[in-house]
Image (tube, helix red, strand yellow):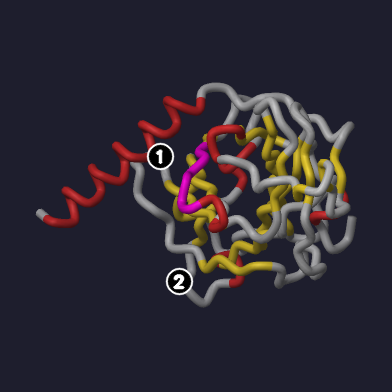
Amino acid sequence: MKSSIKAVTTAFIVSSLLGACGSMPASSEASVSRSPARTGMTAVPLCRAAALALGYGPRGVPVTGEHAVIYTLVNHGRADCRLIGYPEIALYDAGGARLSFRYVHGRGAYVTPAHPAAVTLVPGASAYVLVAKYRCDRGILRNAAAIRLWMPALRGAVLAGRASPGGRGVSTLSYCVGGASDPGQTVAVSPVERTPGATGSLR
């Protein structure tokens, strides 16, 4: 009974977040700075969660065995702001149940090993995050249908998104048959970067 309540609660949270998110916006990297930008003598503040929107970045060219999605964090506020660090993420199936992936930061064959650096966003500009994993060699148990992403520095505020028509987004990130030790159960997350190419290790 408790597990049923938990599953329903999770599904409600995810569906509520997805409803608030709506369609994912187009991205822009035209005016992104990776330098420690300053306005006068005051450092550019961290982005407020309310000023960010989650969107899809360009399709990457996958390397051998890679399943990956590039996401954008778009500043739709009215002032410059900055992001730094690794996002935390969670992936859910179509019923709202959280998939038991192992999530790692900056490790694995696909994401950049570079240390996080501040990315300053002017209004309308985007930062980029790569979410990548190895394929399912023994078969797919469940496909991801929704993602929750949050930046620890933003005090737990969550951005959410779902798969889009045409197979883009989290539906390419599948939970594999084969148990917890299967290589396809580890999801690597890049730090926030100023270009799509900077998120990957081989791009």
Please report the bounds of the magenta region as a residue range.
Answer: 155-160
Looking at the image, which residue sits at the far front? Answer: 41
Q: Secondary structure at mark 1?
A: loop
Amino acid type of the residue tagged 1 in the rendering: Ala
Q: Is residue 62 left or right of residue 46?
A: right
The residue most toward the bottom is 181
Residue at the location (38% across, 39% down)?
Answer: 14
Residue count near mark 1 (Cα–Cα under 10 Å), binned few <14, some 14–19, many ≥20: some
Nearer to us in this view, 175 or 100: 100
Indicate the quadrant containing the C terminus: top left, top right, bottom left or bottom right: bottom right
Packing grade of label 2 (10 A; few <14, some 14-19, many >=20) is few
- Is residue 93 shown left or right of residue 10? right
Percent x, y of residue 196 = 83, 46
Query: Considering depth in this image, is 39 or 56 the residue closer to the camera?
Result: 39
Q: Give the residue pinned by disc 2.
A: 179
Q: Which residue is mark 1?
A: 94
Residue at 44%, 26% in the rendered image = 20
Identify which residue, 172 or 197, lies in the foreground. Answer: 197
Judging from the image, what secondary structure is the residue with disc 2 in? loop
- Tell me the quarter of the picture where residue 16 sits: top left
